[in-house]
Amino acid sequence: MKIATLILPVIAISEASQVPITGTTPLRTEAAKKNIIIGSGAINPSYLNDPEFAAVLSREFNSLSPENEGKWTFLNPSKGLYNWTSLDRLVEFAENNDMVVKGHGLISGCCNPDYILNETDPTALRASLLDHFKAFMLRYDGSRVDRWDVVTEVIKTQGGGLDPNFFYRILGPGYIADAFRLARIASPKAKLFINENLVETLPGKRQELYDLVSGLVAEEVPIDGVALQMHITEVAPIPGVLTDMVKSYNALGLEVAIAEMDVHTLNTTAQTDIYAAVMNEALDANITDISFWGFTDKHLYTWIPGAKPLMFDEEYKPKGAYYATHAALKQCD
Ligand code: XIL
């Protein structure tokens, strides 16, 4: 009995001391002073088994979102069957650590189960969408999930029209408005976002997204904001582009969030500079909800072989990108 009481605290201290320190305040401390949500997406709940991962996540961030666990086929592989265990764990972790959870995966072009992909009747598909949204959104309503990506990547990657995904093929281009209306029925109070990639880089796609979203607003579709993925490859967006986007969406009454930022390059100096430039511009433009697509290069997602796009290395040591983010948060008004 006595031995156990003596040994347990020693184990706890040695685990905690394995996490490298940053020598700064945590990001979330600086963010909280300014009411900013600073988060990490791409959190596969199984990563929480690693105490260092869990310690750094909860120390630095006040928001998180799942990676693939909310995508339809992983959450709801057949009609009526839901795998809640891993998402419940994520939400519980957030509750215990005073973090917001951002819902990700309601509709995406990928990751849809056969029982959905075999549907050809638009009315039945809309009914399945509502069932799915109600199950997913209601389970976490009133808890820490107060914002959702309703649709993700609806425009073709390089621009030039809507992506002809499964929902588009069955429901037509109106599937986007349908999805927002159904999400609003499922959750009357949550913030509803359209999530899109590459608009900060491709002017034509940027205009297409604006035209689409302003059309939704004109039709009184219940949309609250635009979530920019901001997966950046090699080069920062042209200065001013982000600010202009924020102004134009704010003028429509919408919020702009950064949903999945990371920087893919082999040049670590450039990476730090890009984190600094984007964070400074985003904060100057009054973006108050910023997430990265992960935080440690131990669990990264990249298309550039060898790139390490995140702000902590594989051993949880802070990189230049961390300090650039920290400085931007500390300096902003
Ligand atoms: C990615 C995941 O990180 C990968 O594990 C998966 O293989 C593919 O999807 N934009 C999104 C995310 O909205 O859902 C994507 O996540 C990354 C790009």
Image: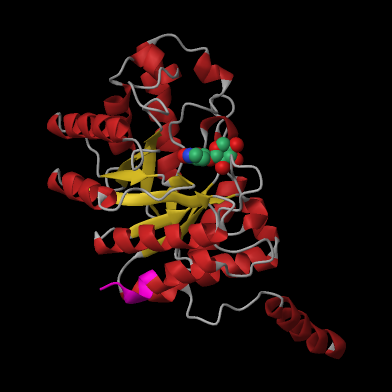
x and y percent of residue 305 in the render?
65, 42
Is 229 on the left-hand or right-hand side of 212? right
Residue 228 drawn above or below residue 295: above
Task: Give the quarter of the figure containing the C terminus.
Answer: bottom left
Residue 179 drawn above or below residue 196: above
Q: What's the magenta bit mostly, secondary-structure-wise?
A: helix
Display colour scheme: secondary structure
x and y percent of residue 131 in the render?
42, 29
Give the quadrant of residue 77: top right
Q: What's the magenta region?
A: 328-333
Residue sitting nearer the eye, 123 or 252: 252
Residue sitting nearer the eye, 131 or 165: 165
Is 212 on the left-hand or right-hand side of 294? left
Identify the residue at horizontal 45%, vertical 68% (top origin): 324
x and y percent of residue 38 in the render?
41, 62
Give the quadrant of residue 318: bottom right
Residue 36 drawn above or below residue 298: below
x and y percent of residue 95 in the render?
49, 63
Residue sitting nearer the eye, 7 or 38: 38
**Residue lying furthest top in this view?**
120
Is 239 inside the magenta-drawn segment? Answer: no
Q: How many marks?
A: 0
Residue sitting nearer the eye, 279 or 121: 279
